[in-house]
Amino acid sequence: MRNAALLKKTPVGRILPFLAICLTALALVSCASALTTAAPGQYAQPKQYTLDNGLKVLIVEDHKAPLAVFQIWYRVGSVDETPGKTGLSHFLEHMMFKGTPAYASKVFTGIISRNGGMDNAFTTRDFTMYYQSLASDRINLSLELESDRMQNLLLPPADIESEKQVVMEERRLRYEDNPQNLLFEEVSEKAMDVHTYRNPVIGWMDDIKALSGEDLRRHYKTYYAPNNAVIIVAGDVRAGELIGQIKERFGGIPSSAINRPAPPAEKMHKGGRRFTERSPQAELPFVLTAYNVPSLPDTDAYALNVMASLLSGKSGRLYLHLVRAKGLALDTFSEYDAFSRHPFLFFLGATAKDEAGAAALEAEFWRELDDLKTNAPEEREVQKVKNQMEASFIMGQDSIYFQGEMLGMFEMMGDWRLRDKYVEGIRAVRPEDVRRVAQKYFDGDNVTTGVLLPEKSPPGVAPQNRSSQTAGERGHR
């Protein structure tokens, strides 16, 4: 994402926007039971088209306001990168704003801005998405600009080298100079032995330095093709008219031969993993644990989602017990992204007041998990978080951006129609399901723990972030 500030929603900045949308729903639990009558079929249903070159198009007509959102999703992310080429998808996202023969560098955003719109993009493990929000009578600008850069990106050497410095600085700012985020990287890498999810989306520093113009051109020519893309338009548009314009702009772009090898399957651990880092940049101790778990459409993902909500937030179990009751931590969180193409990780974390508290936190995490394994949570507690999750999901449909994003997220997992099964899956979770997944995935073999401790430099010695040095060395593993 070009706007790095948008990534600072959590200590790692990796929770996708839809997981945090409509936080006001937390105040609506008392009336959320009324929302459970909303049938998934009541969501705005897209009209689907497929062009001869393989481009898939989803159009949602929503005429509440004269606005529209154009999104183009490419099925390529860090999961598709090879050893030594990490960060390539994110780097190419930056370069997509550097111009074509028709539109010079930085002209794209200027045109959108002058027409009263906004644009941005972001890269994840599984996909890269570009979007523009505009008055609906200006949506033709998106068609013109996006079709142009799908096939005519210049990638001049001077811009590549200049933007490489920007990406490297982004990595330094978000990771090398942020010991908590760096710990997330290290835990993710150590928790996964072979799967490419173990690498950060932004890439390892040594790999970013070594990426070449040829690497970018090969990646662009392979993956930025209509048969590897999905266009989603939501808002005040007429599908019948718009699809004709999309065919005119995109229909002549040739498809690409894509040979996408499946990432190697991760195996369950035989023994837990643990490490400690000391950093002079760390102000307080920070403890992070990760557990290898499945993602959607595996049915266990729904119970894991509910479990994450039970543990997170200021009304969640971790905060109530570790901050409010025992005073061991200053904050706590649980993070689980069910919307991944492949199994990933379930995180628990907390910031301790001191090193003694950090040592105690690991044991307290296990007490919380053991309690869930032994005693299924009460029905009322589970229903509360289910109401909150459903309220956020349903209320989010009022946003045309969110409508498009949800369709895109599920389409990237396999089929946008999975969206209509999500609420049903959450509703079906019972307290016993939460206990079952706690027993199944949260044990001493399937855990990776990272502990971050402050380190004060001796007088007159410049601070050295040991973690950042280690991360740089990992680029050529």
Image (cartoon, helix red, strand yellow):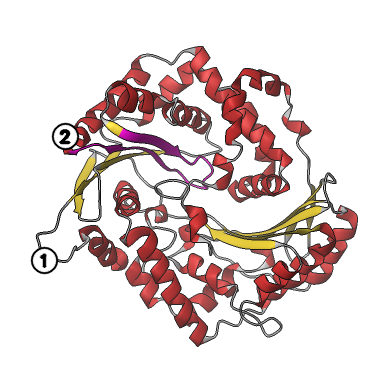
Residue 28, image x and y in percent?
A: 62, 24
At label 1, the amino acid type is Gly
Q: Is residue 85 visible?
A: no
At label 2, the amino acid type is Ala
Magenta stretch prevailing secondary structure: strand
Read off the magenta span: 330-354
Residue 376 in the figure: left or right of residue 151: left
Q: Is residue 46 visible?
A: yes
Residue 204, image x and y in percent?
A: 35, 65
Residue most extreme to the front: 459
1 or 2: mark nearer the eye: 1
Q: For this rendering, which residue is in front, 367 or 443?
A: 367
Q: Which mark is residue 460?
A: 1
User: Which element is circle 1 on?
Assistant: loop
- In this figure, which residue is indicated by the disc labeled 2? 356
Label 1 environment density (alpha carbons within 10 Å; few <14, some 14–19, many ≥20):
few
- Quarter of the image for residue 428 reads top right
Residue drawn at 35 percent across, 35 percent down? 331
- Disc 1 to disc 2, C-alpha distance: 28 Å
Residue 338 is covered by the magenta coloring: yes
User: Which element is circle 2 on?
Assistant: helix
Residue drawn at 40 percent across, 35 percent down? 334
Q: For this rendering, which residue is in front, 324 or 244?
A: 324
Residue 246, image x and y in percent?
A: 81, 64
